[in-house]
Image (cartoon, coloured by chain):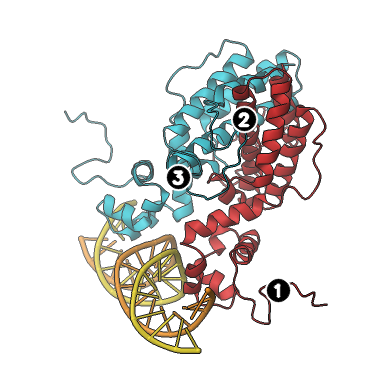
Chain colours: A cyan, B red, C yellow, D orange
Amino acid sequence: MAPRKRSNNSGKPGLTRTGIATTALRMIDEGGTSAFSMRRLGAELNVDPSALYWHFRGREDLFEAIAETLVDEVGAAGLPWAAPWSDLLTAYCIQLYEVLIRHPHAVIVFASRPVRSEFGVRAANHAIELMVASGFTAGQAMQAVQALRAYVVGCALDVSATAITGLQPRQRSARPPADNLLAQGVIDAGDHFRPGLDAMIRGLSA
Amino acid sequence: MAPRKRSNNSGKPGLTRTGIATTALRMIDEGGTSAFSMRRLGAELNVDPSALYWHFRGREDLFEAIAETLVDEVGAAGLPWAAPWSDLLTAYCIQLYEVLIRHPHAVIVFASRPVRSEFGVRAANHAIELMVASGFTAGQAMQAVQALRAYVVGCALDVSATAITGLQPRQRSARPPADNLLAQGVIDAGDHFRPGLDAMIRGLSA
DNA sequence: ACCTGAACACCGTTCAAGT
DNA sequence: ACCTGAACACCGTTCAAGT
């Protein structure tokens, strides 16, 4: 029951960067970014708020760690490394998207800073190699990867924004209801993520 | 020199929602979101901070107004309304993108809430009509518009994030430099926005 | 090495009161 | 109608001090 790995749990937890970041992410997941503060995080960890500053240079440093914690969720499941670049990139984009929309309140934390995950870099590199092997220049391949990432983040933010502001988009603003096609989502276009992703991959292939 | 429009400037400005939002946007443009606070905004407007609460329900209400102020910059220049949908949507995306990257610190404010601009809605509606006229279903057309918007926002956030954290992406994190293709932007792929946009439009056309 | 406690300079928001 | 002033309940961060 107590496997002897010489680590930092012995009754009193002993703070760790990753441990702190994980708790912070959970707080944001549950109550949104506005429910988070250094002081509340300290309380959650049964520690004086100022203790956090031994582990992190400050709030921003902690937020970067939170973003990395988030993106590190990608990679547990396998990716089709042997498949053509289009399948590999599609699969990676889907995984990243699913991780992000699992944390609607934290998407903004991830999206507003440049995060790099070891796994994401590996996937990107391999995809670029595959693309180069099939005729793209390295620059084109890299642009493709960046464009796809931007698309995924944009879609995740969409979900995040509508999820946070209360499920139906823009109910509370009193804009004239504009008797036209998309009015208030009357059409119900369904989720656009997959169609858009496929379109982008298709367009990149051409 | 003083054209007699019966409006609200007579020595003492007289606060307006749009006036306040404009000043707030300028503050964010100049100093980033962290340089903004209700109290500082009050000081900037030579007014007690609490005065703002007569015009806005609170901070969040003000931020929504800021986002609308931002997106309302789109529309000054003309759009090719008579052109095929692909040209219309391309032009609109470019305009939105250019407005956004002109306000790197404010992109996050725009991206993290569902904003609707009169102009954007009109452009979207017309594009959807054109797409339907050339064989798309209304649902497909709407998904296309939403996907494009997500892509534009994602790209703008990219620019924003790297611009804010100091021009070169991720210099300060001590990740192993990974002797591979994209290492630290060694390749220099150039801006991916246009290529990615064109790819998406191409993919949607197919 | 790691955490506490007190202190400093801030916040957003409310509400009675002024004009 | 529009703004002020004071008050309340918070913030992030620093720094000496403890263990």
Q: Is residue A148 above or below residue A34?
A: above
User: Badge 1, how many Cα within 10 Å: few under 14, some, many 20+?
Assistant: few
Q: Residue at x 58, y 78 (%)?
A: B46
Query: In this view, which residue lies farthest toward the front?
Result: A179
Q: Position of residue B27 (x, y in %)?
A: 62, 64
Q: Which residue is mark 2?
A: B147
Nearer the camera: disc 1 or disc 2: 1
Per the model, the C-alpha gap separating discs 3 and 1 is 37 Å
Q: What chain letter is assigned to the residue under label 2?
A: B
Q: Are marks 2 and 3 in contact (CB under 8 Å)?
A: no
In this rendering, position of residue B67 left or right of residue A100: right
In this rendering, position of residue B4 left or right of residue A184: right
> In the picture, residue B43 is in which quadrant?
bottom right
Q: Earlier in the sequence, mark 1 or mark 2?
A: 1
Q: What chain letter is assigned to the residue under label 3?
A: A
Q: Nearer the viewer, residue A14 or A119?
A: A119
Q: Residue A165, labelled with which disc?
A: 3
